[in-house]
Image (cartoon, grey):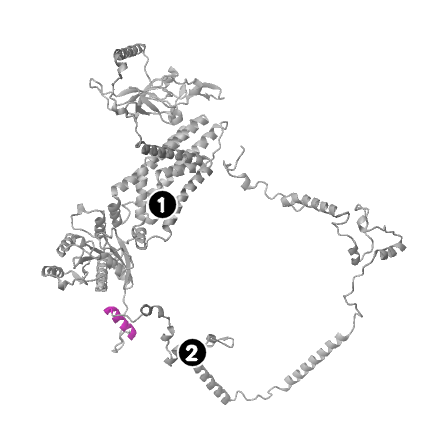
Amino acid sequence: MPQNEHIELHRKRHGYRLDHHERKRKKESREVHERSHKARKMIGLKAKLYHKQRHAEKIQMKKTIKMHEQRKSKQKDDDKTPEGAVPAYLLDREGQSRAKVLSNMIKQKRKEKAGKWEVPLPKVRAQGETEVLKVIRTGKRQKKAWKRMVTKVCFVGDGFTRKPPKYERFIRPMGLRFKKAHVTHPELKATFCLPILGVKKNPSSSLYTTLGVITKGTVIEVNVSELGLVTQGGKVIWGKYAQVTNNPENDGCINAVLLV
Amino acid sequence: MALYNFKKIMVVPTAKDFIDLTLSKTQRKTPTVIHKHYQIHRIRHFYMRKVKFTQQNYHDRLSQILTDFPKLDDIHPFYADLMNVLYDKDHYKLALGQINIAKNLIDNVAKDYVRLMKYGDSLYRCKQLKRAALGRMCTILKRQKQSLEYLEQVRQHLSRLPTIDPNTRTLLLCGYPNVGKSSFINKVTRADVEVQPYAFTTKSLFVGHMDYRYLRWQVVDTPGILDHPLEERNTIEMQAITALAHLRAAVLYVMDVSEQCGHTLSQQLELFNNIRPLFANKPLIVLANKCDVKKISELSEENQKIFVDLIAEGITVIETSSLTEEGVMQVKAEACDRLLAHRVDTKMKTKKVHDVLNRLHLAVPTKRDQKERPPFIPEGALLRRKAMETNAPKRKLERDLEVELGDDYTLDLQKYWDLINPEEKQDKIPEVWEGHNIADYIDPEIMKRLEDLEREEELREKAGEYDSEEESEDEEMQEIRKLASQIREKRKLKILASKEKDTQGPRMPRTAKKVSLSVQHFSIILNPIGNTLDFRSRSLVRKRKREVSAPPTSRTRSQSASRPPRDQSGVRDAKMLKKVKTMMKSSQKEMNRQGRKGESDRHVFDVKPKHLLAGKRKSGTTSHR
């Protein structure tokens, strides 16, 4: 019975076929032609995927070739010039840079007074009521249309209990209630799955804020105790704001960016 | 307990291939056409089906991997330990655990997204959800890249392990590297293990099979073991230790007397003492190998003392040489006998032995008188048994003769024939004589039969069987015979007479010729009746309608020869004939194409042929939408 490395052993004892090496060489050289034939004749989705993959391969090949060629030529080395070194004809302009810094500070102070917060998504598309709330018909003859069902992802608090079904006006289905969000720290570039504490503001309408509807651009409050942030005074920060960056109802998850 | 077959584990695909496979399968096996204006439940169902299909595929394939790979707790401890040595138990279990986790995660993802899709109110939303679901499942699998690669390598190695049965009779060879274990196994079994002068030629376990006393025995060859503590042993040595620890076998410890392996006898003895605990409860034999180079008697005093000590402890030491085959058979016999005895002993000590013993009964015939009746063994069998035991040189085989003579050898089986006259052995015998096959007529007892027959004939003649018989019939019989012959004669005469009678009169023979009437003859016949025949040559005859032309009233067969054949009647010349023929053929074409018998055949066998109407319209075959 063939045991362990029987193929290598056979090769060692009996060698290769008489035409083995020639066949191998010819097969390898034929591979080029076969690949080109395949690339030309393929159609459909397969072709798209193949061409995409091949394009990426070719880019890598070109990069390596260029790298090999670079060794031969000389190029300007940017690292040699130290930071802050200014050419002679710009030596007088120091004062101006300082002025710029000051004006920036003044602008920031003005913004803070106005109460405008800097957020990653300043403008978002407004969601109309017909989009967010779906009319539910009730009654014996299905004529009454005072109930609404939320069609977007929403957040309800921990101690949430529904109003008695007969009187509840806004239905928030359980399948669309989310508790966690994937929050990215913009500087660390790391993403964490943090529990949501509440919805701070929905840019489309204050009604949505009270309902807890989360759409793109909504500012939510998340529990960041996992990150272990501490204030200068020594207190532990456990809640921070984050802004939602995707459409949760289309993706099935809430992606947000932490507002630092 | 699931039965594992290490050679039948399914190939574990790489992460990238796995993803490509499943996604392309989803695209091919689920419906692909959907429109915005379809009803929303239909749209939802369409996308939910895709998500569930992908999840099902992943789940099935991953489950198959999990069931195919053996669980280390379910297999024999020998194999469990061997796999631990080769593949690291922790890593193995972790890899399988990761696959299990991935499977569960994929299931959960599918469940969540199917639940979300129930709230999808537009095609775009459902499509995005499906895209998110499939993407998440593929990402989960992309993370398992390392585990899948590792499992594929494990599978390849596992399928090449030798199949060692841990429960059957086994002989285990162990010792330092290069002492001659692999040469021994090559001599005793048909295994073809590599033998080279450098140490650690054998890097893993090899198994060979041999027969002794009509039973099958396994011989296991191990890689050499060096003398250092257990913690410092590498993978190769650990395989040997595993085999020693788990297989209940007879242990053959091989020592190199000539010290050609590079280690002195005292070092070998050290190793022997160190691994002594592993030999507990196992029949042990020490092989003093390579004795063709140096015998024990040629050794120095201290070295000889080693062997004397071993023998004093009660361990059998046998001098062997794999090169000259000296002592190999002796070792085989000794080891097998002791192992068999050991196995029988262990079986006797278990509880199950009573079931077997109760069923065994040796029946001995009761003595009826004082006469001795020993068993009869034919002489040939006794001689052969003696030859087997002493291992005397066997009779010269044809093979040996062939090897000796080389090219001049011819196979001559006639020399083994047992004839009355041995000089006739090489006589040529014909095979066919006068059209008969001689082999059909050969009877070894033909002379005896001839003699018997002749004797019988003599006896019969003497008894008078062949004397002529007299008429022993009575008067009645003779009368009847006479009458019968008369009746027969009369009958024959009657038949002849009836043949000569002419009952039907003279008849015409059937060879009458055809009478061809000319046109003149026609007119002569028809004129007295009053019919006139238009006297024109055949080519100028006008085309008449069917109702007008009336066939003549009396016609014989011979008259039909003068009428033109149907496809030429009414046709003026060759050009017209050709046109007529093409018209006929073109009118037939359509019916032939449709396979119809004629214009009235309207039966359609297959209104909706499946091969034209089923299947998807793929991009290669459709140029329109």
Badge number at residue B240:
none
- Identified by mark 1, the residue type is Met
Of B483 and B499, nearer the camera is B499
Query: Magenta region, mostly helix, strand or loop?
Result: helix
Q: Earlier in the sequence, mark 1 or mark 2?
A: 1
Q: Nearer the viewer, residue A66 or B620?
A: A66
Mark 1 closeness class: few <14, some 14–19, many ≥20 residues within 10 Å: some
On the image, numbered disc 2 is attached to which residue?
B444
Quarter where residue B425 is shown: bottom left
Residue bearing the label numbered 1: B10
Badge 2 density bin: few <14, some 14–19, many ≥20, Cα 10 Å = few
Please tell me whether residue B211 belongs to the stretch shown in magenta: no
Snapshot quadrant of residue B390:
bottom left
Residue B420 in view in this figure: no
The secondary element bearing badge 1 is classed as loop
Q: Position of residue B147 (x, y in %)?
A: 30, 39
First to last magenta residue range: B378-391
Residue B168 x/y as whole percent: 27, 56
